[in-house]
Amino acid sequence: MASSLTTFTDEAKIALDTLSGRATGLFSPSLRLGVTGLSRAGKTVFISAFVHNLIHGGRLPLFEAQKSGRIARAFLEEQPDDAVPRFQYEDHIAALVNDRLWPDSTRAISELRLTIEYESASGWSRMFSSGRLSIDIVDYPGEWLLDLPLLGKSYADFSREAFDMAVLPVRADLSQEWRALSAAIDPNADADEMTARRLAESFAAYLKACKLDERALSTLPPGRFLMPGDLEGSPALTFAPLPGLSERARPGSLQAMMERRYEAYRTHVVKPFFREHITRLDRQIVVIDALQALNAGPGAMADLERAVTEILACFRPGRGNFLTDFFSRRIDRILVAATKADHLHHESHDRLQAIVRRLADRAVARANFTGADVDVVALAAVRATREGTVKQGRETLPVIIGTPLKGEKINGDTFDGRTETAIFPGDLPEKIDAVFDVSGPDRQQNPGHRQANEDPAIRFVRFRPPKLERTAEGVTLSLPHIRLDRALQFLIGDQLA
């Protein structure tokens, strides 16, 4: 897939940019880490916790360089790309620590440079290494990444696939209004701005409805229809798929207008994003909210698998050599992380990880993805709950204890955002196949999403960030987590060996 996204000219620009970056890196080693995921999966929280735990010496027993005491210090520096907005780490930490509020979701691309000074574990490496590594963390919406396959698709391909997806059982009712509007319009009619606007708004409304918690769908291109950024209202976002397209559009027709705007979107929005950011990455983490998809049912899980497949297909995996690395970057490690593990008792953490392993393995196979190490982990970058048990008759139930967000509901009760409570979240299924099965007998009438009378496997309640402990001297301890140290070891541990 990735090889079809660029032209020879694009590759030449990428090679020159890589050569310039590598030359600088000879004297100041750096690693570019991409962090992506669909909205509300936890990208901002992951980056904030990643940086906070390294700067403040957090409890990271599985992160070897920290455990062995080889990290002298970690600190923030100016990022190398002045044209990219800075990741507002300080604001996000203030929201988490002081206000106990989750920071705002990623709406656009941003960057942050974290530098680590360390001592190599190898005496030979200490002779030739500066003992200093800069990590350029690049945060970008996963919705934008799902646009990259459009670079290999014509407007006719895009339209056909959009309508094929729209009639799937999990989407058919949500897309009905847009499909009815499209069916009443002749693509060969004269181009009309108001018609194009109505179609685009109806199509965007359908995509946004797919994203809501009840369906929790993931494969929803074009991504800028969900997160327009500074393009909101521009002609580049005023297009939509059309049915019944002619093989060659009549000049001045609605079809010709839509094709032109689709091409503008690919050329001026999608391609620069790929060339200027994705092709410069060395490592990547893809964070996913598997719990939300599990709650919504097998249709949402199948759609999440489709999204992960398309994301993997857009990366440039592999390992280069001393010569090729000067002209081309390859992503050699990718971590697929299921977030919000703290919403489950630890007895279900391994099951969640097994489900994500199955999802990632299938996505890797479908994407024909080779050349990079891919691992999975179930984690909570910031742990908002603790565990306990409650007696219910003769039965002892494992529960999680935390402060639900104001307005969250369970069993008819609405939480006030201040009261701590114990919740039995339920158990993940032991049989993984059931999670991906959209053809079960209880879904024959409405396959693809959960029935109205079907209880969710997990009672998913959103919690406030934790109240941090303080030492006797009044020093705030680092943010608690689940398996963040394992993620750090996989993503950067070998660079600090």
Image (tube, rainbow, N blue to C red):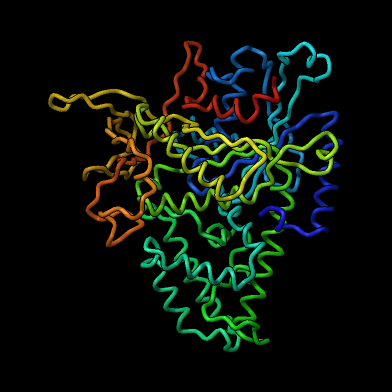
Q: Position of residue 363 (x, y in %)?
A: 53, 47
Q: Quadrant of residue 194?
A: bottom right
Above or below: residue 269 compared with residue 316: below
Front residue of 205/416: it is: 205
Q: Is residue 129 visible?
A: yes
Residue drawn 55% across and 20% down? Answer: 62
Q: Position of residue 155 (x, y in %)?
A: 62, 72
Q: Is residue 137 visible?
A: no
Residue drawn 22% across the image and 43% down it: 411
| Image quarter hosting the N terminus | bottom right
Vertical position of residue 46 compared to residue 493: above or below = below
Outermost residue on the left side: it is 393
105 vs 348, left or right, is right
| Percent x, y of residue 135 | 70, 32
Q: Nearer the viewer, residue 278 or 139?
A: 278
Query: Which of these two is toward me, 171 or 359?
Result: 359
In the image, residue 38 above or below residue 165: above
> What is the total number of numbered labels drawn onto the structure image?
0
* Quarter of the figure with residue 468: top left
Location of the C terminus by quadrant is: top right
**In which quarter of the view is residue 88 placed?**
top right
Left or right relative to 293: residue 478: right
Residue 115 image point, x, y percent: 71, 27
